Image (spheres, rainbow, N blue to C red):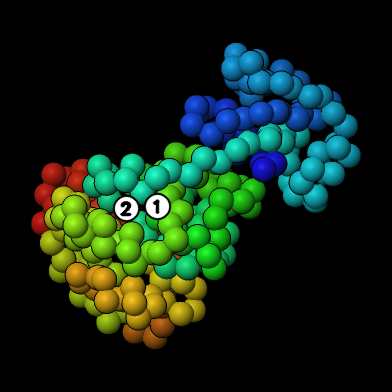
Amino acid sequence: MYIYGRNSVLEALSQDKHPVKRLFISKKRGEEKIVRLALNRGIKILEVPDKVLRDLVGNQNHQGFVADVDFIYEPLDSLFELPVVLALDHIQDPHNLGALARSAAAFGVRGFVVPKDRAVHVTPAVVKVSEGNVFKISISVVTNLRMAIEEFKERDFWIYGSDMEGKALWDVSFPERVVLVLGSEGKGLSRLIKETCDEFISIPMEPGVESLNVSVSGAVFMYEFYRRARSGRGNDR
C-alpha cells in the first residue's frame, strides 16, 4: 500500500517488521531524516514530480513523501504474552482504527484483534490518522472473533466488554491480563460477543451525554490501564 505524509513515512522507516519497498520523494524536498533512514536501510528512493505523488495517493496531503509498504499481520498466538489486548467487534471506520492505534501506542497497548470480514483493516488512511503509530501495534486478523476471545480466556485473560450499562471504570479492579472488547460504531457489541465477556465496564459521564465515539472511549480505557500499571497498583481506583 502507498502511505503518505512525513510522520507516517518516518515511522514506517523506523521499524523492521513491515517492509518498505520504495520511497517516493518530491523534487522540492531536500535531504531530510527520512532520506537518510531510507539510504541506511538500502531502500530504493525515487525523486519525482508532485504529479506522480498525486497519482499514487490522490489529493491527500502527502507533504512530499510517499512510501510503498507491506503491512504484516500477526498470528493470534503472538498476542498471548501481552498484558492488554484490544478486540474490535467489526469497527468499520478507518479513522476510528487509526485513532485507536495512536492512543494504544501512547498508552502501551501493543495488540489488536480484528475480524476478517465486515471490519476495517490497515489502510493508508488508518496509517495517516495514527501518524504511523499503527506500525507499533501487532494486529491479528481472525475468521471468528468470538473463538479468538475464547482462546484468550483459556489463557487466563479477563474479558471486559465496553457497555454503557457496565460497572463504572473507577470501580473495577483489573487483573494482570486483560482483553478489552470495543463494539462497532452505532451497534456496539454484538450478542455473541457479549456472551464471551466476563464483565462489562463503562465510562462515567455527566448527564445528557449519550455516548462517546469508540476511539475516544477506547483511549479513556487504555489510559486507565496505563495509569494503574504505571502506579504499580492494578486495583487502585
Residue ID at (46%, 72%) = 184
Residue ID at (25%, 66%) = 160
Residue ID at (40%, 55%) = 113
Q: Disc 2 residue type?
A: Val
Circle 2 residues within 10 Å: few <14, some 14–19, many ≥20: many
Q: Disc 1 residue type?
A: Phe
Circle 1 residues within 10 Å: few <14, some 14–19, many ≥20: many
Q: Is residue 203 left or right of residue 57?
A: left
Cα gap from disc 1 to disc 2, whole angstroms: 6 Å
Going from N to C along the chain, the mark reached first, 1 or 2, is 2
* Quarter of the image where the C terminus is located: bottom left
Mark 2 and mark 1 in contact (Cβ < 8 Å)?
A: yes
Q: Is residue 119 left or right of residue 44?
A: left
Q: Is residue 183 above or below residue 4?
A: below
Q: Is residue 116 above or below residue 198?
A: above
Horizontal and vertical percent position of residue 224: 26, 56
Q: Which of 223 and 15 lies nearest the eye of the viewer?
A: 15
Horizontal and vertical percent position of residue 107: 34, 47
Q: Which of the 4 image quadrants contains residue 173?
A: bottom left
Residue 8 in sight: yes
Disc number at residue 85? Answer: 2
